[in-house]
Image (cartoon, grey):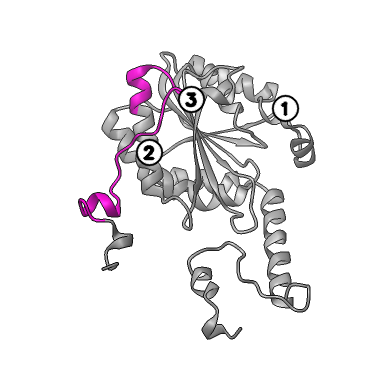
Amino acid sequence: MTDALNPWLELRRLTPARIALGRTGTSLPTHAQLDFQYAHAQARDAVHLPFDHTGLSEQLAERGQTTLLLHSAAPDRNSYLQRPDLGRKLDEASAQHLREHAQANPGGIDLAIVVADGLSALAVHRHTLPFLNRMQAHIDQAGWRQSPVILVEQGRVAVADEIGELLSARMVVMLIGERPGLSSPDSLGLYFTYAPKVGLTDAYRNCISNVRLEGLSYSMAAHRLAYLMNEACRRQLSGVNLKDEAQVNTLESEVPNENFLLKDAD
């Protein structure tokens, strides 16, 4: 079938999914095979890319935010990948540093923002600043008291619970690099917990995933997170009992009683 007669080509322009790759005999064409290998290499590189916490700290300082650098109990990347449990807690030096900070700043806080490399430091490098720039307006409007931005090397999601507990934070938000896919090596995940403490399971967290230019926009992610945080403060809970019911503008809501898919049907 020629390109002009291939209906899949129009769909390929709308998605990064690997469809309509063609074939050479019973195999993939060379260009499709090379593209797959390149995407796989990008995903592997994202997993092993070192966390540039110095560069991120400098960027945050330019927008007037202080940072604290901590480290999980995983001493290196290999340990982090082989022992997920070590990434879920702070090493003793970091925990003590956080205790001292909390003692020097008594009274607790409303919100702790934690940034960890996770499985894609690339996602953190690319998307942390643009997302926080949009989120800050919601934080300022609510009047929440913030801690310094906490940067964690070799961190996993649950380490935010320990950080929130040590800071006596009412809420904690974790920004973390998600597991890379073959079309998304830089996907940022947001994990929100109300009343964080050590030992909570995923059932007590809300997740907003795929924050990146080709996925969920920074503004939409900030809007959804702000909704969850406001509702959590009102209802004093998070997780499976707190649903994302944020009102957002859609094509259908902008044009009442008109389905854009059927607009030209008649």
State the separation of the CA atoms marked 3 and 2. 15 Å
Residue at the disc numbered 1: 85
Q: What amino acid type is highlighted by mark number 1?
A: Asp
Is 250 colored magenta in this rendering?
yes
First in sequence: mark 2 or mark 1? 1
Where residue 27 sits, quadrant-wise, is: bottom right
Residue at the disc numbered 3: 240
Image marks 2 and 1: residues in contact by CB distance under 8 Å: no
Q: Main secondary structure of the magenta part?
A: loop
SS of the residue under disc 1: helix
Q: What amino acid type is highlighted by mark number 2?
A: Arg
Front position among marks 3 and 2: 3
Taking depth in this image into account, of 36 and 106 the one nearest to the observer is 36
Looking at the rendering, the stretch of residues picked out in magenta corresponds to 230-258
Task: Tell me if 253 is positioned left or right of 81 in this view.
Answer: left
Task: Tell me if 147 is positioned left or right of 256 in this view.
Answer: right
| Residue 171: mark | none
Query: Residue at the spot x=60%, y=52% of the render?
Result: 122
Residue at the disc numbered 2: 224
Residue 5 appears at what percent x and percent y?
53, 83
Query: Residue at the spot x=66%, y=25% of the render?
Result: 90
Residue 186 appears at what percent x and percent y?
57, 53
Where residue 98 sits, quadrant-wise, is: top right
Q: Is residue 195 above or below residue 86?
A: above
SS of the residue under disc 2: helix
Q: What amino acid type is highlighted by mark number 3?
A: Val
Can the viewer see residue 99? yes
SS of the residue under disc 3: loop
State the separation of the CA atoms marked 1 and 3. 23 Å
Residue 25 appears at what percent x and percent y?
78, 78
Count neighbours of disc 2 (C-alpha within 10 A) and say few if under 14, some if 14 to 19, many if 20 or more: some
